[in-house]
Image (tube, helix red, strand yellow):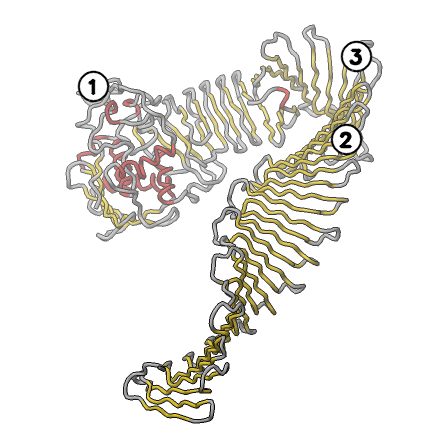
Amino acid sequence: MCTICQARDPSITTYESHISDEMAASNGTETSVSATLPSYTLDQVAGQLTHGYWNQTGRDWRAFDVESGGTLSYDVSQLDSKGQATALQAFEAWEMATGISFSASTSGSADIVFTDDYSGAYSYSYVAGHEITQSYVNVNTGWQTYGGYYLQTFIHEIGHAMGLGHAGNYNGSANFGTQAHYQQDSWQYSIMSYFGQWENPYTNASANYVATAQLADMTAMAWLYGASTTVNTGNTVYGDGTTLSQEGMDLSRSWAVTINDNGGIDTIDLNSRSSSQRLDLRSEHFSDVDGEVGNLAIMRGTVIENARTGSGNDHITGNEGNNFLETGSGDDTIVASTGNDTLSGGAGTDEVIMNGNFSDYKFGAKEGLSIEDGDDTTVLLGIEAVTFADGAATIAKSANETTLSYIADGETFVSQVVTSDTSNTQDWTSRTDAFDADGKLLTRVTVFDDGRIDKEDFTGPDDPGGPTTETLVDTTGTQKWETWTQTRDENGILQSSEIVMDDGVVRTTVYTDGVASTLTAVDTLNAHSWSSYVVAYDSTGALASNTMTLNSGVERVTTYTDGVRTRVTSTDVAEVLAWETKTQTYDSSGTLLESRVDLDNGICRETAFENGRKTSVTTTDADDIMRWTSHTVRFDADGQRVSQSMVLDNGLGIEKAYANGTVATTSVTDNEDLYRWDSYVDTFDENGQRVSRDLVNDNGLEIKNLYENGQRVQAISTDVSDIYRWETLTKFYDASGTLQSQQMRMDDGREITRTFSNGLETETTVTDTDDAFVWASHTHHFGDNGDRERHVLTRDDGLQIDTTFTDNLRSAVTVTDGGDLYEWSSYTTNFNTATGHAVERVLTTDDGDEYIFSYMEPDVGLG
């Protein structure tokens, strides 16, 4: 269960003394701020409500397990009739703020249960993890004497019950000077604040109780439960004749409120009011309504399309919607925004403020005087003045025409006059005349009803009254262009040409001494894959460069030498693709030489070409995101890969050679000495099967492996550095990879041959090829189970010793005098395998006699 969160009791709270009597306590004192507080964004204030307040006491955010559009239950059966009615008003405020519905219940298991029999006002919740399982709210009946603060208290406590903390790290009572930690801590931003608008020196707002959740409260609830999508989706009226029953939506001066609206064509109607309104329809902005200050806000994502004000001198700021703004009979100001808007000033002297320069707009006669900016059209009705970013204009009307006279900032004369055929009695829609300081007509642009545009220039030096600019208009639609305007100097030499094509492309060519120097094309209707391009020419008129901006955000620059393309560089200016730049280089004949692509991840890929065919591709990992530093692939004249080089991050160098597109050899070099080998080379057949591997170890050992059908059949090791006692070691394997035999050449001249069967050694023969020992050879024989069965030793003097074994124990030894050194030809000694003792010896002499000896004691050998 969370700690009790209390509402602020105005009967015991000290307020600032400059508030109205109805809100000030008798013992009020001034609030002072000792240091400048930081300014919070709306999301930061919301974060204090959802996280900051709880975190400062070691707790975390909490919410019911429901989303916007869902339902929570409540039980108000323990409240008196006024308490029940006020609780329902508070729930209506939270339903508008969150899109969550609230249903009545008399069950003690309701999500939110209300009581009024305990002193004070507070809320507490049962929380499991981040989930609120049930909340309780108590507002004592004594708080009914606090007027509007009684409703505000219910809204505040329900905010706690649904998971919001206080706007500051306080509870029960607070002092702004010592406990506020940011500038926005007041009721103007959050109903969860302890500070009225008058207590916060950073807040410019009237003292009002709050009838709704405020901007930060709604933003915080959107984080906890999701943004609302079902609130006030119809055509809702706020203010006079409001279509809502919710308290405060009549926008009276009694309350401060925030509007949350998810759809429809909506209106703020203040037509009956005589106060001067400052109404800002932009979301997350405050308005001054009905003589109050900062008492109305519009929630993030809310679009109010229409507004009406009364007889005061009103100021309305529009929003991005299609607005209809009507300001009544005062001297009013309307700030225009984007969208297709109608701005009606009514009686009085009214002004419209446009955000752009005068030259940014086109003027027409749609319903009244219309100002066009791209796809947006603003219609002015009953407006006497227009202010632009670079000047101001007055509007005059006659029976058939409306005239707008523009004076630029810093000037005292009318420089532009726009006349609109508002009665539609002429064959033209508008006419724009430009004048100099002496009132002389300089240019005239006439827009005809059929869309033709006639541009006249009266500034020619030889004939001040005659134009030097000629405009052709394709009124019949037989050409591919709509208008073609050419400008010439006093000698008749062409200076510029502008062609407006049927598809919306505007092509402007500038000439130097009669030779084209630049051509700029702009796709005004988005009919092409590009938005604009600029072509530059050299002094001879030959193409020098072309800079094109594609709709995808890519900028492509093509350069030329003697009119031949030499380089194309594309840059992903909008950063929407996986690469940063692409560059292609060409030779003097226009044949591609090189292509380079720099990817967003730091990979650089460079491709070289010869006679237009690809010869190599080198890829470099500049940002070290791969396991390799670089690799290069090379190709032959037929485009088949012939080799590939790769350097890994760990220093390994890999070289691959190809034959007919298939890997023929792979060489790997340990450049950083990370492994126990220096290099190895794999060789492959035409089918890609490995046929050999030559490995050179750090210690100089060279190992050559031979393969058949992908299986190793032979391994030859050579001790090049003479670190072992042998020179070469050769192993032979069968088709399954099982070792069959092994040949070893020792440093001392011995040759050792071992044979295997089923992985077990069957025979080992050692031959003394260099005659380094007293014996010529000896051979070990092994059985199927790997046990030694026989050993035959042949000495240099011809003596042969043949030993047999049973269960790895010596059972008999036969010695044959092959060199006729002795008087006997052979003898055989039999042994007891259990004790290892000789039990019998049979000796055959040279003359054929045979002697048999029996032994009782261990064999002590021949005398």
The three-letter code of the residue at mark 2 reads Thr
Report the front residue among 270 and 766: 766
In the rendered structure, which amino acid carries the disc numbered 3?
Answer: Gly
Asked if residue 155 is positioned above or below residue 659 in the image, the reply reads above
Gap between marks 2 and 3, in whole Å? Answer: 38 Å
| Towards the viewer: 524 or 566 | 566
Q: Amino acid at mark 1?
A: Thr
| Distance in Å between CA atoms under marks 2 and 1 | 82 Å
Indicate the secondary structure of the residue bearing disc 2.
strand
The numbered mark, 1 or 3, whose residue comes first in the sequence reads: 1
Give residue 403's quadrant in the image.
top right
- Which residue is at the far top? 438
**Of 13 and 486, the residue lying toward us:** 486
Assign a secondary structure to mark 1. Answer: loop
Label drawn at residue 561: 2
Which residue shows up at 50% across the image and 31% down it?
Answer: 306
| Residue marked by disc 1 | 29
Going by the image, does 25 lie left or right of 805?
left
Q: Position of residue 618 (x, y in %)?
A: 63, 45
Numbered disc total: 3
Where is residue 346 drawn, in percent x and y? 53, 21
Q: Which residue is mark 3?
A: 460
**Residue at (37, 25) in percent of width and height:** 294
Quadrant, the C terminus: bottom left
Check if mark 2's residue and mark 3's residue have beta carbons within 8 Å: no
